[in-house]
Amino acid sequence: MSANDKPKLRPIEAFPVEHDGRRLVVLRDALRWTDNSVVVSPTLIPILQRLTGKNTVVDIQAEFARATGQILPSEALNGVIAKLDEALLLDNERFQQYRDQLVREFRESPVRPAAHAGASYPDEPAELAAMLNEHLAAAGVGPAGAAPSAGQLAGLIAPHIDLRRGGPSFARAYRQLHGRDDIELFVILGTCHLPMRHRFGGLRKDYATPFGTAQTDRDALESLAAELPFGFFDDEWAHRSEHSIEFQTVWLQHIFGGNLKARIAPVLVGSFHEFSEAGASPLGDPQVAGFTQALRKLVEARRGKVCVIAGVDFAHIGGRFGDEEAMDEARRSRLERDDRAMLDTILSCDAEMFQCNIAADKDARRICGYPAIYTLLAALRPAAARFLDYAQSHEPETNSVVSFGSAAFYR
């Protein structure tokens, strides 16, 4: 790195961690082009804030000295920059070549490869099946036998937290599908954790997992696209690294014994943030109104042979999400109280009642499944619902909590 170079940091997420009694900060790619992360001391934050692409190395050293009264040696600064560059967290030619190669490979592939096998869950089919069966057993539902029914199943809410932490909650949701060979199409509404051009984005590629390839119903996706006032396939790239649909696909394949005859329609759902801020119904937005109507039309045309699955989590609070409050037992109890009040509105099957609950505190708990849950309720208009599970994942090392659960909906 020369003295005249102007390094630029790409969009990153930063969250605090503790290790051996030391407070550190983890940096990772906010846009998920790479899974790389860098751990730095909080004292380096002033340096990171100056990596704007407008400051030379000399400028950064001078500004650091003015702000802190300390000298920043060139060797130390270049070491930080090299570490970020190696992790592909700098916006430079090296990253751009890497990004362009990823885009080419994804576009040319006939399938969407399993992005999280071997990391979030085992990549060996036998080991993966054993893990999921353990979750079924832990949930007290077992791998065989019919699940109780309150009517004709129309939809499910299942988590998208990693398969290990969310195991029993996943199991209680997917147990409802045992023996349901009459279902021909699973429309999977996945929470999108990346920015999207539109509210909804379909993917026409088949989904690969360690269990094999789940076939995508392109006709269903095209029928949805034909009804919409926006480019339904403009956000296909967002599917590449998104886990919220991949995890549902893994469970679908497993619950049908590795022989999933039904097809899937993978759809990512983007942010509804402005609706919670304004307290306005999402149905006032042409994209939301158009998609919910198109999905309802598709479900009705298939005459009860469609199940809509929302891959969602609930609250995200604590250190990883910018909160300083201690996530102690009392705080987690209050979180459960608030989450269960929200669940009551979901189980009422009333999309607008759920929307009012979210808007009441402007989505203070960061319910990442809010858009997909609202979409499911507004499109299906279920006649009844059944609570299946609620749980929290507490990370003491980051002082953070993610809550999640599952529910079934009936016509």
Image: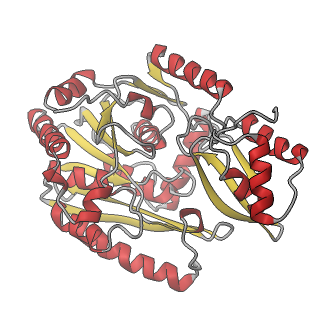
Is 23 above or below relative to 334? above
Q: Position of residue 114 (x, y in %)?
A: 53, 31
Residue at 46% from the left image edge and 62% from the top image edge:
140
Name the image quarter holding residue 268: top left
Quadrant of the rendering where the N terminus is positioned? top right
Q: Nearer the viewer, residue 277 or 306?
A: 277
Badge count: 0
Residue at 52% from the left image edge and 86% from the top image edge:
330
Q: Hey, which residue is sitting farthest bottom in the picture?
A: 330
Is residue 195 among the parts visible in the rendering?
yes
Is 261 above or below relative to 169? above
Specify whether 226 is left or right of 214. left
Q: Position of residue 106 (x, y in %)?
A: 49, 21
Residue at 35% from the left image edge and 28% from the top image edge:
203
Q: Position of residue 187 (x, y in %)?
A: 28, 38
Is residue 148 among the parts visible in the rendering?
no
Which colouring convention does the figure follow? secondary structure
Residue at 46% from the left image edge and 67% from the top image edge:
391
Q: Position of residue 77 (x, y in %)?
A: 82, 46
Is 178 above or below relative to 203? below
Specify whether 376 is left or right of 298. right
Is 280 above or below relative to 72? below
Name the image quarter holding residue 33: top right
Q: Nearer the viewer, residue 113 or 87?
A: 87
Specify whether 228 is left or right of 270. left
Q: Nearer the viewer, residue 343 or 38?
A: 38
